[in-house]
Image (tube, grey):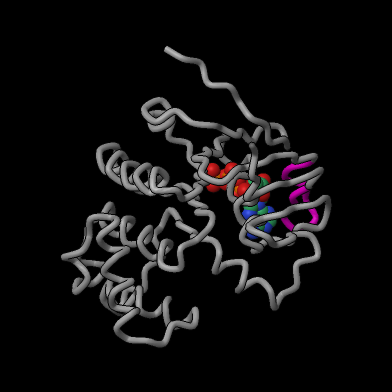
Amino acid sequence: MSNPILQLKNAAIYQGESLVLSNVNIEINKGEFVYLIGKTGTGKSSFMKTLYADLPLTEGEGQIVDFKLHGLKEKDIPFLRRKLGVVFQDFKLLIDRTINDNLLFVLKATGWKDKEKMNTRIEEVLNKVGMKTKGFKFPHELSGGEQQRVAIARALLNNPELILADEPTGNLDPQTSVEVMEVLQEINKNGNTILMATHDYALLLKYPSKTLKCDDNQVYEVVQRKG
Ligand SMILES: Nc1ncnc2c1ncn2[C@@H]1O[C@H](COP(=O)(O)OP(=O)(O)OP(=O)(O)O)[C@@H](O)[C@H]1O
């Protein structure tokens, strides 16, 4: 039975005045791993930004983790974002503090108070991405792949219902991309739903999964050829 965690109906996505995607009708169910592909400039990032309410949905309807995207109020955006884990191409770690303090910062900003519980949670998420022993390091002391694993750990802190990853392997070499992908696959196997924008076709071939494509101002599901 389908159990949508994300549903867009007749949605149009704009950057300012210009229409990027129109007539978007898609559904993502709990537990799925979904790719979002498409040439550069076709609207993948705009699509992602609409989902985490960085761009408003002004046309059509959108439902994501129990929030309505159309008519979403400014004051509700932080609550929506707490239910999402967002991972970016450029990691976006705070460079002036250690990995532990990066994660602590997010926990405090999202309402956690108990020091012991925070430390336990930090250890748990770092463990999930194989970075348990690196919490004392500063971001610049880690490789790109390690930084991205920390960024994934950060996205997991509040048990998000959906993880949005926008080109998470875009800055990584092929081997490191596979390592980061293994982490995302593992997280998905443990029940997290993931939408990942990418133009890394090698990853699609190695880890085939449901794929949405942005092309010609449309988003549609593509059927992957086998063999
Ligand atoms: N901040 C912005 N203001 C105005 N137009 C924008 C803005 N960001 C993107 N666009 C335009 O929106 C369209 C879609 O861009 P978007 O970044 O969503 O594509 P993309 O598929 O993510 O590309 P890439 O793979 O290069 O990241 C492009 O025509 C782009 O020029």
Vertical order, 184 against 51 (above or below) = above
x and y, in percent, of residue 110 in the image: 49, 78
x and y, in percent, of residue 95 in the image: 32, 73
The quadrant the N terminus occupies is: top right
Q: Residue at x 55, y 64 (%)?
A: 83
Residue in front for this viewpoint, 46 or 77: 77
* Residue 179 location, quadrant: top left
x and y, in percent, of residue 131 in the image: 22, 60
Q: Residue at x 71, y 32 (%)?
A: 216
The quadrant the C terminus occupies is: top left
Residue in front for this viewpoint, 114 or 102: 114
Q: Which residue ends up furthest to the front in the rendered image?
A: 1
Q: Which residue ends up furthest to the left in the rendered image?
A: 133
x and y, in percent, of residue 162 in the image: 53, 54
State whether the magenta stretch is mostly helix, strand or loop. strand
Q: Residue at x 56, y 46 (%)?
A: 30
Magenta residues, as a range?
A: 12-22
Left or right relative to 190: residue 34: right
- Is residue 96 highlighted in magenta? no
Vertical order, 67 against 45 (above or below) = below
* Residue 129 location, quadrant: bottom left
Q: Residue at x 42, y 77 (%)?
A: 107
Left or right relative to 220: residue 115: left
Residue in front for this viewpoint, 216 or 152: 152
Count of numbered badges drawn on the protein: 0
Left or right relative to 158: residue 135: left
